[in-house]
Image (cartoon, rainbow, N blue to C red):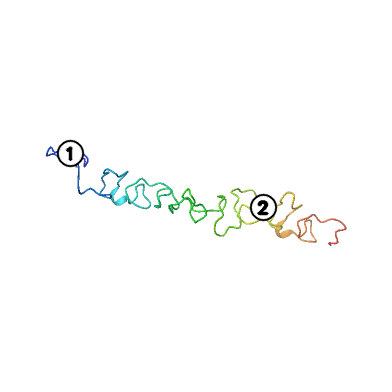
Amino acid sequence: MSDPLESSESGSSDTSDSGSACGDGIVDPGEQCDAGAENGPGHACTSACLVNVCGDGERGPGEGCDDGNAIDDDGCTNVCALPSCGDGILGAGEQCDDGNAVEDDACLGTCVFASCGDGFVREGLEQCDEGALNSDGGVCTEDCAFAMCGDGLV
């Protein structure tokens, strides 16, 4: 099979082709790529014969999503990833998302607000936190403070 970009055997030097079109498998002037039937979402070449990049509105290889904008909190991040807990972007179903897995700050690694009884001691706010074992008759009270003699709790 001959190279479609080389001149024809008739010796004509006319390389124009009025029948050229995006999707024909031939990279024509104005096209960055053309993979024929493989153009489009999920592929390296878009349906407009442009190289697929994050933000072009077509989901390409390695992209979890591509909504064609640079807004982070609309269901698709500006790096074409689906939002997830720990990415630093508040997503649906998250109370908070500080972008870290530190468990002793105001936002737990599960993207819920820290609170007394969650099993994690927050420095300066709680003396102790044994989670479900907190009790006013135990070592750590229901208020996340150490039980002590004279506190009125038995």
Q: Quadrant of the C terminus?
A: bottom right
Question: Disc 2 on helix, strand or loop?
Answer: loop
- Closer to us: 108 or 74: 74
- Closer to us: 132 or 64: 64
Residue 65 lies, in percent from the top left, at 44, 53
Residues packed near mark 2 inside 10 Å, few (<14), some (14 to 19) or many (20 plus): some
Task: Using the rendered view, name the quadrant where residue 112 is placed.
Answer: bottom right
Asked if labels 1 and 2 touch by Cβ distance under 8 angstroms, the answer is: no
Residue 40 lies, in percent from the top left, at 34, 52
**Residue type, label 1:** Ser
* Residue 40 sits above or below residue 6 on the image: below
Q: Residue furthest right?
A: 150
* Residue 62 sits above or below residue 94 on the image: above
Horizontal placement of 105 versus 145: left or right? left
Horizontal placement of 75 versus 10: left or right? right
Residue located 60% across and 50% down the image = 98
Q: Distance between the residues labelled 2 and 1?
A: 69 Å
Q: Residue 112 carries which label?
A: none
**Residue type, label 2:** Ala
Residue 102 lies, in percent from the top left, at 64, 48
Horizontal placement of 48 versus 70: left or right? left
Q: In which quarter of the image is the N terminus?
A: top left
Q: Mark 1 points at which residue?
A: 7
How many marks the image carries: the answer is 2
Question: Disc 1 on helix, strand or loop?
Answer: loop
Earlier residue among tags 2 and 1: 1
Residue located 23% across and 48% down the image = 20
Residues packed near mark 1 inside 10 Å, few (<14), some (14 to 19) or many (20 plus): some
Residue located 81% across and 56% down the image = 147
Residue 97 lies, in percent from the top left, at 59, 53
Q: Residue 106 carries which label?
A: 2
